[in-house]
Image (tube, helix red, strand yellow):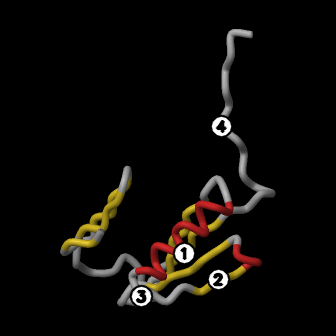
Amino acid sequence: MVEGAFAYGDGWMIACEPGTPLVEKPAHFGFMLDSREKVDLWRAYFDGLGIVVDVQRGGNAIFIDDPEGNSFEIFFDPTRFISPLRLDDG
């Protein structure tokens, strides 16, 4: 859901504040997820909002741009993902 400068959902929130850009050219932000299925969920979410989604790397990555031209990459890379460590008593 988006309200003003806030975008949020179940367990996440992004707050945006207008101001002077930190870099002169558009920036790139990357978010690595722990599964391809989660990338697909984000793609469906953005598609549902009517946001143009650029799909790359065989569907393992999606890119969207904000109105100022900043690029946001949401991706899964099975060669770089490390599963969380689980400690058991046994």
Front of the two marks 2 and 1: 1
Which one is in front, 73 or 25?
73
Circle 3 SS class: loop
Q: In this figure, which residue is indicated by the disc labeled 1?
A: 43
Front of the two marks 3 and 4: 3
Residue drawn at point x = 68 percent, y = 16 percent: 88
Label 1 – label 3 distance at C-alpha: 11 Å
Residue type at mark 2? Val
- Image-quadrant location for residue 73: bottom right
The answer to whether mark 3 and mark 2 are in CB contact below 8 A is no
Residue type at mark 1? Arg
- The disc at residue 50 is 3
Q: In this figure, which residue is indicated by the disc labeled 2?
A: 55
- Image-quadrant location for residue 43: bottom right
Label 3 – label 2 distance at C-alpha: 15 Å
- The disc at residue 84 is 4
Quarter of the image that includes the N terminus:
bottom left
Which one is in front, 86 or 38?
38
Measured as percent of width and height from the top left, residue 67 is found at 36, 89
Residue drawn at point x = 64 percent, y = 83 percent: 55
Among the two numbered marks 2 and 1 on one chain, the one whose residue lies closer to the N terminus: 1
Q: How many marks?
A: 4
Measured as percent of width and height from the top left, residue 10 is found at 37, 54
Residue farthest along the right direction in this orientation: 79
